[in-house]
Image (spheres, rainbow, N blue to C red):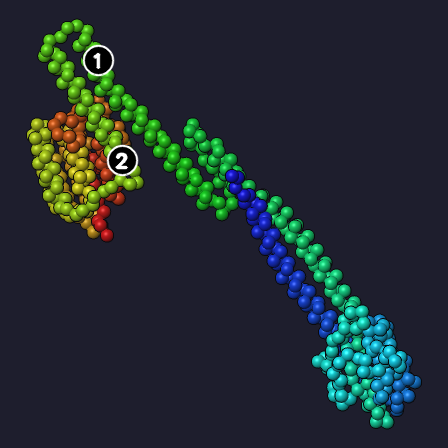
Amino acid sequence: MRGRSLAAALALAFGATTLAVFVLVGSFLYVALEKQIKAQDNLDIVLAARHARRLAEELDSAQGIREHSERLTSIVLGNEAMSMEVFDPDGTRAIEHNIAGALAVPDAASGAATIAALPPLARVAATARITETDIGDWTGRGGAPIRGILTDARLRNGDTASVLVARNMSDRWLLLDRYRDKLNMAGVAGVALAMLLGYLLIRAALRPLRDIAASASLVTVNRLDTRISVARVPRELETLVASLNAMLERVEHGFQRLSRFTADLAHDMRTPLSNMRGAAEVALARPRSVDEYETLLASNLEECDRLSRMIESVLFLARAEHPQFVKQLREFDAGQELTHIADYFEGIAEEANVRVRVNGAANVTADLELFRRAVSNLLANAIRYTPPVGEIVLDASASADAVRVTVENQGQPIPAEHLERIFDRFYRVDPSRSSLPSAGLSQGSMGSTGLGLAIVRTIMELHGGSVHAESDARSTRFVLRFPRAR
């Protein structure tokens, strides 16, 4: 199933955000316009009502209303939406202007329009001030929305006439409807344009990701040295590119290490197999005595032991690199364990004419079997390269943050360029010494596999510690550093 487009998803999100903004802004503008129009119309109605009442109060009688009708209706003259009706004291309509059938309806029997035909509006007393709160709303004939004020006016003769000033709001609602439609159209068009432009801009912004993917696709088994260029990468992606390049570097290093390991393993396994094959071919070239056949079998058995130790070491390294490798950590006396290891190697040391001495004491938290294996490998290595009558010192000491175990032996110093690499698998300072006795935990004779120091480093990494070598004219020292338990 194909995944959704990130650019499309971001464009949709951008469009939704734009739509929400347009809705909020459009609603605000619509409401603001509606309030402004309503306020202006209210002001026009109030001012017209005040003016009409003032003019009516200057008239002497009801007859003067009809005589001065033009003067009164001039107030709403020129505005077709504004209407005015003036009623006599008896309630009969005396003046009408621009009513368009929206206000008082004539009585069916008499044919005259009276104030009783008006909607139920609150009258403003002749002495009261006319304000916007006095404006009423009703629906005229034909469903037209009407807003207006009904006020009394005291004539000079003491009679009370009534003045109705109203406005047909149909044009206003039509204006607002058109304005709303334009806002909707503008919003839809704006959202569509925003989504299109957002999609194009997002695609352009995501181009560095496509370039990274294209660069990553160039990485193959034969081109593990390929790296992703950071020259034109945005700052936000620099960390990602740096992480990918670091990952590629680790993959390249691991692949190279695996290739070297495979090649070295094949080379080292080929040697004992070649030895056994060569010896067997020589033995079969002509009849041999029983003693010669026994010597051949013993030689082949030694080569088989060497292959077994090599396979065991490789399997240990493979298991140790697995994340679920189990360690049985416990606290013990490192000095006491060094003494036990020295006693175990006593026969081999005497055979090599070297002496093993143990110094110091310190409590260490580690896997006991792995601790013994690491120290045993270092001790066997030291016995192999210590000259006769030499001395090997095993020392344990503690500091505030770590416990140090040192294996020191006399002999030829190791060149500085080899000190770091001696912990690599199958690495030997002098390849010609590969047949010399070697380190291992197997009892009896041991042959070099080139994996002893690599196993030591792996064991220390499992404990979160480290191992390093120091060598000078005085001695060679291998130092194990176990961190203290927190």
Tell which residue pokes out farthest to the top in this image.
286
What is the quadrant of residue 271 in the picture?
A: top left
Name the disc covering residue 358, or none.
none
In the displayed structure, would residue 439 be above or below residue 74?
above
For marks 2 and 1 on the same chain, the one whose residue lies earlier in the sequence = 1
**Residue picked out by circle 2:** 319
Neighbor class of circle 2 (other Cα within 10 Å; few <14, some 14-19, many 20+) is few
Q: Are marks 2 and 1 in contact (CB under 8 Å)?
A: no
* Residue 78, horizontal then vertical, whole percent: 86, 73
In the displayed structure, would residue 313 be above or below residue 334?
above
What is the quadrant of residue 407 in the picture?
A: top left
Image check: 379 left or right of 134?
Answer: left
| Element assignment for label 1 | helix
**Residue picked out by circle 1:** 278
Q: Residue at x 87, y 76 (%)?
A: 97
Q: Nearer the viewer, mark 2 or mark 1?
A: 2
Q: Amino acid at mark 2?
A: Arg
Tell which residue pokes out farthest to the front in this image.
109
| Element assignment for label 2 | helix
